[in-house]
């Protein structure tokens, strides 16, 4: 159904060549639905599409960039205990921290993952009850998630509001919410739609 709706929209709003590039794969998908699958033979691989797994690599990129900005390195990464995804997190960290793996992963128009400053770091999973660092992270997340109500009541709890603003102004968050996704998608769409068309080369056919 979704592919058919996209196909109808593309047929009405695009030039001939764009329609061809978009409609050909859509028509193939419509005609060959049984050839598309997300099935995984390993049970652990079925967890790879969960949000907390998808965001792990971008978070490693943020750690590495933060360390670079402070002319430092990441020696240890501590993650809250999640037994179901533990093996996946270990695999991702093992790959990205390997000194023989490239320090930058090219994402073409989407930039790149920077991993230089997490090379040869260690990875550990703990429960927050035994990790003051994770407890601090939980406090920060709580304040950020309740930002609006905290600021609305800053006269009642000024210290809480002050701590919240300190975290916001001195930190950087990775927004993987629906609103964050829509905001980023709109920015990318605006960028794409404002790129001027290039004149066709005289030698092109």
Image (cartoon, rainbow, N blue to C red):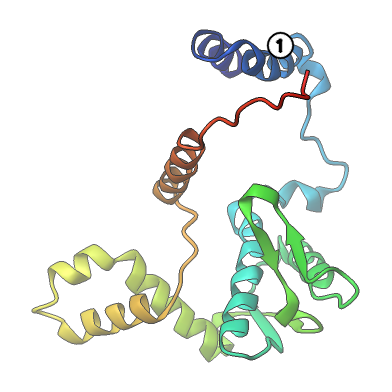
Question: Which quadrant: the C terminus?
Answer: top right
Judged left or right of residue 142, residue 22 is right
Taking the spot 55% from the left edge, 81% from the top edge, the residue there is 128
Quadrant into which the N terminus falls: top right
Residue at horizontal 59 percent and vertical 71 percent from the top: 62
Disc 1 target residue? 27
Task: Give the left or right position of residue 102, taking residue 178 as reference.
Answer: right
Q: Nearer the viewer, residue 119 or 198?
A: 198
Q: Position of residue 168 (x, y in %)?
A: 35, 75
Splitting the image into 4 quarters, where does residue 81 fall? bottom right
**Whether residue 105 is situated above or below residue 115 in the rendered picture:** above
* Badge 1: residue crowd in 10 Å (few <14, some 14–19, many ≥20): few
**Residue 189 screen position, x and y as percent:** 47, 37
* Residue at (77, 71) in percent of width and height: 93
Residue 65 rendering spot, x and y as whole percentages: 61, 76
Residue 140's place in the image compared with 109, above or below, is: below
Image-based side of 44 in relation to 179, left or right: right
Q: Is residue 25 above or below residue 152?
A: above
């Amino acid at each position: 159904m979704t592919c058919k709706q996209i196909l109808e929209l593309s047929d009405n709003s695009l030039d001939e060549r764009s329609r061809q590039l978009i409609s050909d794969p859509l028509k193939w998908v419509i005609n060959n639905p049984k050839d598309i699958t997300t099935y995984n033979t390993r049970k652990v691989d079925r967890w790879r599409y969960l949000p907390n797994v998808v965001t792990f690599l971008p978070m490693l990129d943020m750690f590495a960039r933060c360390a670079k900005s402070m002319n430092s390195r990441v020696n240890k990464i501590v993650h809250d205990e999640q037994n179901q995804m533990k093996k996946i997190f270990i695999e991702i960290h093992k790959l990205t921290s390997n000194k023989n793996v490239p320090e930058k992963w090219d994402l073409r128009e989407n930039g790149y993952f920077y991993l230089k400053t997490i090379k040869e770091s260690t990875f550990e999973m703990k429960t927050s009850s035994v990790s003051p660092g994770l407890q601090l992270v939980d406090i920060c997340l709580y304040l950020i998630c309740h930002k609006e109500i905290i600021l609305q009541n800053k006269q009642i709890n000024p210290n809480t509001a002050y701590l919240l603003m300190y975290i916001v102004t001195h930190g950087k968050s990775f927004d993987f919410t629906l609103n964050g996704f829509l905001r980023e998608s709109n920015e990318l769409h605006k960028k794409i739609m404002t790129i001027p068309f290039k004149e066709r080369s005289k030698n092109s056919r």
